[in-house]
Every structure is written in structure tokens, then in C-alpha cells.
Amino acid sequence: MLATTTNLNTSCALAAVFGFVLLAGSSGAQPPLPTSARPLDEKKILAEVMATRAQPELPSLDKMLISAIENNPDILVAKSKLHEAEAELNRTRLQIARQVITLRFSVQNLRVRVEVLQDGVRQQRITVGPLMEKLVELTALEADLQYILGGQLSPNK
């Protein structure tokens, strides 16, 4: 019987504690919230985040400008266009040089032929027709050479 009385006393004590807990909970007083559920102070959190955030050191202005000049896509495209234009300029220079050389030697040869033909006409060995043909050809070549030289064809230059 003693065992039954002990069990009964234990059960009553547990019921009393459980009832007290229920009454305390219904009285309107709430137990304290855990730390993780407390309202957050946004300013404090922002200050903590900003303090712990590692801000990288900015490079010097000189280094930034050098990097921009070397790596900026717009500058790289402009450099590419510049190199292409320089290559075209060099091709044009070579073409003009070839034309000047060809025209110069052609004019020299025709001048010699014209002199020979003039001597033949003076000595009445040939007619004027071939001389006139070579003079027309020489005049055309000299005009082409003058154009290529930019309008400057003088015997001393």
C-alpha cells in the first residue's frame, strides 16, 4: 500500500506543477524570447557589418589610368583601326613609289628616243610622224608623273 501512496503523491505533485505552469502561462506574462528571436537593431547590425567588411585598397590613379589605357575595349578597337590604317598607308606608299619609279624610267627613255628622232628629222632621215607620236606619249607620261608627284615636276628636283 505504501507503494500506491507514493505513486499517488508523485502524481499529485506532478499535476500541481503542471497546473501551476498552465496558470502562469495564461496570466499574460510571456517567458523571455531566445536571443535569436529578439528584435534586431538595424543600425547596430549595419555598423558591425561595415566594420568587419574588408575594403580593398584602391590602386593609385596612375596604375588605374595605365590599366584603362591598356585594357579598355574602346581603346583596343581604336588601336586596331589605327594599325589597319597604317598598313593601308604603307601599301599606298609602296604603290606610289612603284609608279614613280616606272614613270621616271619611262619618261627618261622617251626623252632619249625623242632626241634621237629630233636628230633624224633635222638631218631629214625620217619624217615628223614618229617624232610626234613619241612627243604625245612623252607629254602624257610627264602629266602622269606630275600628278603622282602632287603637281611638282621640275627638272632640278
Image (cartoon, rainbow, N blue to C red):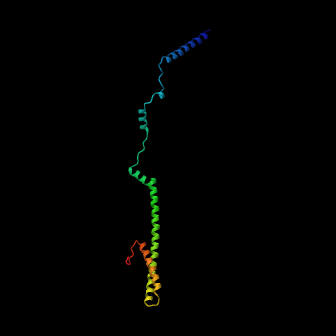
**Residue shown at 45% from the left, 71% from the top:** 96
Which residue ends up furthest to the right in the rendered image?
1
Residue 7 location, quadrant: top right
- State the quadrant of the C terminus: bottom left
As rendered, which of 6 and 54 lies closer to the eye? 54
Residue that sits furthest to the left in the current view = 156
Pick the residue in front: 24 or 140.
140
Instruction: Please report the residue visible at 45 percent of the width from the left and 76 percent of the height from the top.
Output: 103
In the displayed structure image, the side of residue 11 where residue 83 appears, left or right: left
Q: Is residue 25 above or below residue 50?
A: above
Horizontal and vertical percent for residue 78? Answer: 44, 57
How many numbered badges does the structure rendering display? 0
Residue 99, percent from left and from top: 46, 73
Q: Quadrant of the N terminus?
A: top right
Q: Position of residue 22 (x, y in %)?
A: 52, 17
Q: Which residue occupies the foreground of this view, 152 or 35?
A: 152
Point out residue 87 in the picture as x, y percentages from the top left corner. Answer: 47, 64
Nearest to the observer: residue 136 or residue 78: 136
